[in-house]
Image (cartoon, helix red, strand yellow):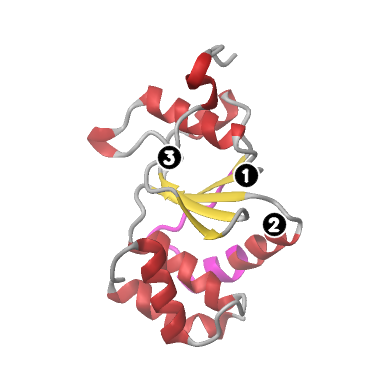
Amino acid sequence: MPPKLRGKWALGITPRNFTWVIKDRLAICERPGGYGENHRRVRRQEEIIWLRENHFDLVISNIAAPHNLHAYEELNMPYRHRPLSGADDTDAFLRLFYKELQDLLGRNMKLIMHCEEVGDRLLGIVGGYIRWSGMVDDPSQAIIITERIGGRQLDTWARELILNVHTLR
């Protein structure tokens, strides 16, 4: 049973690098609690509470390993584990993942997606979805928008994903 929190802690804390991709519908963030040596269990708990208290319907974890998924269960936060590892067929993964994302958003669900960090892998997936869904058809515009969301330039992998994602429709 999750601990009872009082005062301002009852509302949790905003996850690091929290950014809206589609306002009030789809957001991205760093893995709740951080990653690597910076990971803190208490922070993870506070960030998951914030997601729950801010009425997110679902957390989507794109991290390859199932680390810390139990924390979502413990705090009654629905989640889906959709790992994308280097061994996966990226095109096959994205075909299924983008359809699932479209279905969830079509049901007016409020979603948050994360990898270990808000890096090129997560930004490439998000930028690819922006283009795949038809929100932005022009690949150059989709890259520019994705770079604004991430606050930096994308690497080659992310740019190529966005440039070629139209073939997955």
Q: What separation in Å lies between label 3 and label 2 (alpha carbons)?
A: 22 Å
Residue of label 3: 15
* Up-down relation of residue 77 to residue 61 (above or below): above
Q: Going from the N terminus, do you reach mark 3 or mark 1 first?
A: 3
Q: Secondary structure at mark 2?
A: helix
Residue 125 shown left or right of residue 159 in the figure: right
Residue 128 at x, y percent in the picture: 49, 73
Can residue 9 be seen by looking at this rendering? yes
The answer to which of 81 and 1 lies nearer the viewer is 1
Q: Are marks 1 and 2 in contact (CB under 8 Å)?
A: yes
Q: Residue at x 62, y 81 (%)?
A: 169
Q: Which residues are magenta?
A: 80-97
Q: Residues within 10 Å of mark 1 (few under 14, many from 20)?
A: many
Return the residue found at the far front.
Answer: 7
Q: Residue at x 38, y 68 (%)?
A: 148
Residue 139 at x, y percent in the picture: 46, 85
